[in-house]
Image (cartoon, rainbow, N blue to C red):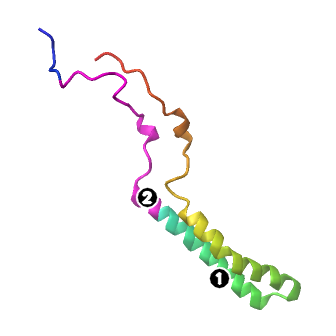
Amino acid sequence: MARGSKSAKLDANSVQSYDITSAPKALSTDMAARQRRYFISMMIRTACFILTVILPSPYRWFALLGAVTLPYFAVVFANAGRETVSPGDALLSEKARSLE
């Protein structure tokens, strides 16, 4: 008599197995990291505005340029979260299943 039922028999090509190291980070961890990156970028922008007032004329324009352009880059870097490629993604491939 064969062990297992008809539903328990699975074709080796229909089942994928993944390593635990290739699992993505938790969404809450990812959100916290993105919020932290955005906050740090906005603090740098605030420092640029303060430096615009404090610094003499030639350097003032560089600080102002940083204060004006930083929001764009802050949003782009903060939104670059879960869709990035992690180092283990290249290793994902169908693995041969062993006999159980």
Check disc 1 and give the amino acid type: Thr
**Screen quadrant of the N terminus:** top left
Q: Residue at x 64, y 72 (%)?
A: 72
Specify the label residue 29 is tagged with: 2
Specify the label residue 37 is tagged with: none
Would you say the magenta stretch is mainly helix, strand or loop?
Answer: loop
* Residue extending furthest toward the left: 1
Q: Residue at x 50, y 68 (%)?
A: 35
In the image, which residues are magenta? 7-31
Check disc 2 and give the amino acid type: Thr
Up the image or down, 65 lies above or below 31; here it is below
Q: Position of residue 50 (x, y in %)?
A: 70, 87
**Screen quadrant of the C terminus:** top left
For disc 1, the marked residue is 46
Q: Nearer the viewer, residue 77 or 6?
A: 6
Q: Quadrant of residue 73?
A: bottom right
